[in-house]
Image: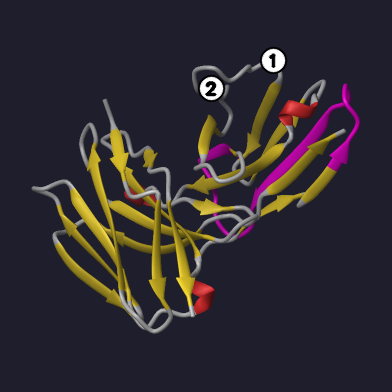
């Protein structure tokens, strides 16, 4: 299957700082990338969908000024958590699709963010 | 609205068989995925069904009935490493994934 690389896998940051998470498709062109958030023992919650070269579409309740998403190329999307607070601590996962109409989601490894 | 239902938690014995059910209601339908997710890790792909019937892949099989809006994941010869959450996701008419909340499977010796 296709490979999606997400970096970093773990990050600890101080409250008030910003953190950038990268998601790269290594062997295919990802026309669409998805960013999810997952709290312990809960399912994936879609935060936003981004198409290459376009502004991201955010789900209801997700602050677009706080969670900045950039999808500048067909192989890279970034999520920046700005002015992070402890309640932003979570597991963030990206997925990418781009292989025809099957819409299979190829996931990155996930990023465990802890804001202290 | 769009909705995916699957049991929250199931328990089974090592070596046994377990069936995890998933029912869905979506605007259009373009297939259904099953993913496995171990705690603290990203989901990994298990199966994809778009036609009615059973697809077998080793110890795991997945079944789909489009007329009933129903799927199940069948796990045979359970191993302790199968303890994980199993996520069902349906693809709607816009090719967006609609996720279930996941079924936590606990395997006991």
Q: Residue furthest front?
A: B109
Q: Is residue A61 above or below residue A2?
A: above
- Residue span colored magenta: A12-37
According to the picture, the residue beneath numbered tag 1 turns out to be A65
Q: Nearer the viewer, residue A107 or B14?
A: B14
**Left or right of residue B57: residue A92:** right
How far from the left and from the top, in percent, is residue A45? 51, 35
Q: Is residue A49 above or below residue B95?
A: above
How far from the left and from the top, in percent, is residue B33? 35, 55
Verify whether residue A18 appears in magenta.
Answer: yes
- State the separation of the CA atoms marked 2 and 1: 10 Å
Verify whether residue A28 appears in magenta.
Answer: yes
Q: Residue furthest right?
A: A14
User: Could you tell me which residue is drawn at 35 percent across and 80 percent down?
Assistant: B59
Describe the element under mark 1 as helix, strand or loop: loop
Q: Nearer the viewer, residue B75 or A55?
A: B75
User: Could you tell me which residue is drawn at 88 percent across and 35 percent down?
Assistant: A13
**Left or right of residue B14: residue A34:** right
> Is residue B30 visible from the viewing direction of this image?
no
Is disc 2 surrounded by few (<14), some (14 to 19) or many (20+) residues within 10 Å?
Answer: some
According to the picture, the residue beneath numbered tag 2 turns out to be A58
> Is residue A36 visible from the viewing direction of this image?
yes
């Amino acid at each position: 299957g296709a490979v999606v690389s997400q970096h970093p896998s773990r990050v600890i940051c101080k409250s008030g700082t910003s953190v950038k998470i990268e998601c790269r498709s290594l062997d295919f062109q990802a026309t669409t990338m998805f960013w999810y958030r997952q709290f312990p023992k809960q399912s994936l919650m879609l935060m936003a969908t981004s198409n290459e070269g376009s502004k991201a579409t955010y789900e209801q309740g997700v602050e677009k000024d706080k969670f900045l998403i950039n999808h500048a190329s067909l192989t890279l999307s970034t999520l920046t958590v700005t002015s992070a607070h402890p309640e932003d601590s979570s597991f963030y996962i990206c997925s990418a699709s781009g292989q025809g109409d099957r819409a299979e989601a190829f996931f990155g490894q996930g990023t465990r963010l802890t804001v202290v | 609205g769009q909705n995916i239902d699957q049991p929250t938690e199931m328990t089974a014995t090592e070596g046994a068989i377990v069936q995890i059910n998933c029912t869905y209601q979506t605007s259009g339908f373009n297939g259904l995925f099953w993913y496995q997710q171990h705690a603290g890790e990203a989901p990994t792909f298990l199966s994809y069904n778009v036609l009615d019937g059973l697809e077998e892949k080793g110890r795991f099989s997945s079944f789909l009935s489009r007329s009933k809006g129903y799927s199940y994941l069948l796990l045979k010869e359970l191993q302790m490493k199968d303890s994980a959450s199993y996520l069902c996701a349906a693809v709607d008419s816009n090719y967006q994934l609609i996720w279930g909340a996941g079924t936590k499977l606990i395997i006991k010796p």
